Amino acid sequence: MVMTLREASVDACGGKAAALAMLLREGLPVPDGFVVPFAAHRIARSDAGMSVPHELWDALARHLPVMGDPPVAVRSSAANEDTARGSAAGQYESVLAVRGTQAVAEAVRVGWASSSSARDTGYWNHLNRHAADGEPDMAVLVQRLIDADASGVMFTPIQPGDDTRIEASWGFGAQCGRRNRHPGYLRIRVRRRHPARHRPQDDPPGSRRPRRHRPRRVGREQALPTLDDATATTLADLGGRIAALFERPQDIEWAIADGKVWILQARPITATLPPLRQNAPVAGDVSLVGTPGAHGTVTGAARVLHGPPDFPWVQPGDIAICPYTDPAWTPLFRIAAAVVTETGGVLSHAAIVAREHGIPAVLGIPHATTRIQDGTRITVNGTKGTVIPARN
């Protein structure tokens, strides 16, 4: 009913688990653990209540004590996740910082249930990349939780000579696509480094965390660069090794705890990033400048949104102006012509999903929801990272 993470294969456990298994076998720093394979999900699907089979319960009760019964991260590894066809970024549920057989079994059931969500079905249908009828098989990763001092996302170079692009933030978790969060941004080509300052973090999109576990608070750390030069170079070197191993550019989650770098996820880059915005002053009638998130230029009516309840106000061709996006916002990308957010960066949920849907995105414009008036016509250039009043 379970197998060690090192044994995971694409056919039995999906792309996410198989990629981590390969990294483990190559000696890279991946938190060890085990996988509940597709076979267990198939058995559970035959039960209308999606209950955890007794055999799986017994297997969890045996394997968790072998790990020392630590807090664990329970994460999806669906058959159609983390592939070259699409990232499915945040579409499936993860449950973090759970402990004990009963809690882990419930987290596994949550992961299984997310494979049949309307959100997931709509995502794949819109991309016209649904590979099979019905819900995908779902494996579930159970790994020792990394209670990180710093964490983030890294994109390895797409073309020879390109920089490694890294977003980082202080504290728990690994995904920079978080709400209420400005990540630090770096680009690495051996010696080039561009640190940024940080805001407090929040939960990763598509994840749940028990109330008893809270991220550590960050105080003076917020005003400091997240990564020193040596750690940034170590990350870039690890990224190069991983890209070479998979023979294609990679989107990599990482975390740092007690000075050690951990790799939490590696998947193919599914869409090219826009070029970096230069720090030179912007001339002309540009009113707002942010981070380029997804290629393209669109003119339309601004629609200021504060949450999914506002989605009915969006019409095809409107430009969504919002504080942030997370997986609950994914249906918006099937309607809006472009997205502008107040927080996030080029490796965030909003940017990744916008690139996959082929719509422009500009990220990290402070107070965009108050600086842009609802209904006004604007032009969004996701390649340059600009938002300007539309010309009549």
Image (cartoon, rainbow, N blue to C red):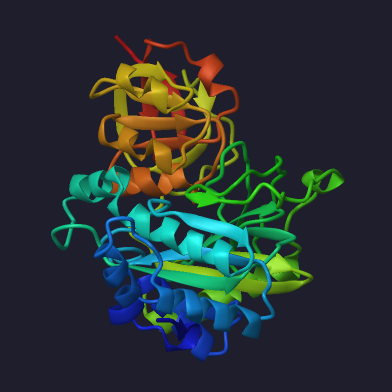
317 vs 255, nearest the viewer: 255
239 vs 105, nearest the viewer: 105
Q: Eyeballing the image, is 383 above or below 11? A: above
Return the x and y of residue 361 as percentages of the image width and height.
Answer: 40, 37
In the figure, is residue 241 to the left or right of 226? left
**Would residue 300 be visible to someone looking at this image?**
no
Quarter of the figure with the N terminus: bottom left
47 vs 243, nearest the viewer: 47
Return the x and y of residue 47 as percentages of the image width and height.
Answer: 28, 62
**Residue situated furthest front in the rendering:** 54
For the point 71% across and 62% down, which residue is it? Answer: 148
For the point 74% across and 68% down, which residue is it? Answer: 257
Which image quadrant for residue 228?
bottom right
Return the x and y of residue 13 as percentages of the image width and height.
Answer: 35, 76
Return the x and y of residue 252 as percentages of the image width and height.
Answer: 50, 66
Which image quadrant for residue 146?
bottom right
In the figure, is residue 64 to the left or right of 243? right
For the point 42% across and 74% down, which residue is it? Answer: 54
Q: Eyeballing the image, is 316 above or below 164? A: above
For the point 33% across and 63% down, which residue is it? Answer: 81
In the figure, is residue 26 to the left or right of 84? right
Which image quadrant for residue 8?
bottom left
Q: Eyeballing the image, is 337 above or below 277? A: above
Quarter of the figure with the C terminus: top left
